[in-house]
Amino acid sequence: MSAPRIRRYTDRAAFVEAAAADTIELMAAAIASRGACRIALGGGSTPRPVYERISQAGPAEGIDWTRVHIFFGDERCVPPEHEASNYRMAKEAMVDRIDRERAPRVHRITGEAPPAEAARAYAAELGESPLDICLLGMGGDGHTASLFPGRPEAAERTARVVAARSPVTPVDRVSLTLRAINEARAVRFWVTGEDKATRVAEVLREIASGEPALPAAQVQPASGELAWFLDEAAARGVK
Ligand code: 6PG
């Protein structure tokens, strides 16, 4: 695996602008070349301001939202209106800010259903076509999506969607697997904050060593393009 592209930005505002511009460019390219864009959104708190910025894109940037299919990298097994729902965050930060007449198609993970049932339904919705874009975050333990270190689902390489367990609440999750993530045409990590710096450096060292152990280090797209977008605080340990 070639070394991932590292993009580092002096502060949070520069990070948000760059991550949004990069994603809009990838979306426009997918729509131009394939007539549609299948994008999986990352969860947690980092993406919120970037989604708000992306929601402002339109035809001038090559974005016809009616051609965009929004998926999710993972979901907490909670109802869609729950404060921990990744769907709710994306709805507030992106989907609800887009003209309803030109809305994207949202493929929600049914967090209110039993995890195994939700995973089956989402796998059927996702299908077997590769994602155009997979947006990811990284936890301080090196997890990504809801694939946590040491968990069996982090080693799943056949299914594209699994029911997963988190060491922190909400414990029950549904997540894309590394198979689905590594099939994507473009994968992006968005990581900010001093508290992530040590783990970011460790993950990048694991990738360089050819012996990736942490889930975030095992994101190595088969043919897709991988880039890490970092603010300086998270990039502190990266040469
Ligand atoms: C989730 C995310 C998870 C997240 C990281 C980073 O459902 O929690 O998918 O993988 O990206 O935990 O979260 P923050 O952006 O909140 O630090």
Image (cartoon, helix red, strand yellow):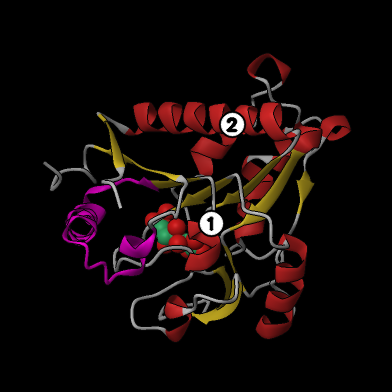
Label number found at residue 183: 1
Magenta extent: 190-219
Q: Position of residue 112 (x, y in %)?
A: 73, 75
Label number found at residue 156: none
Mark 2 Cα-neighbour bin, 10 Å: few <14, some 14–19, many ≥20: many
- Main secondary-structure element of the magenta-colored stretch: helix
* CB atoms of marks 2 and 1 within 8 Å: no
213 part of magenta stretch: yes
Can you identify the residue that label 2 sits on? 54
In the rendered image, the quadrant that contains the C terminus is top left
Q: Quadrant of residue 141?
A: bottom left
Q: Is residue 100 visible?
A: yes
Q: Position of residue 18 (x, y in %)?
A: 42, 27
Q: Work out whether 159 lies above or below 62.
A: below
Mark 1 Cα-neighbour bin, 10 Å: few <14, some 14–19, many ≥20: many
| Mark nearer the viewer, 2 or 1 | 1
Q: Work out whether 154 lies above or below 137.
A: below
Q: How many marks?
A: 2
Left or right: residue 125 compared with residue 13: right
Q: Quadrant of residue 210?
A: bottom left
Residue type pointed to by label 2:
Ile
At mark 1, the secondary structure is loop
Q: Position of residue 195 (x, y in %)?
A: 23, 55
Q: Which residue appears at 25% of the width and 55% of the height?
A: 196
223 part of magenta stretch: no
| Sooner in the amino-acid sequence: mark 2 or mark 1 | 2
Q: Position of residue 144 (x, y in %)?
A: 42, 63
Q: Which sits in the foreground, 93 or 83?
A: 93
Q: Which residue appears at 70% of the width and 66% of the height?
A: 109
Q: Is residue 53 visible?
A: no
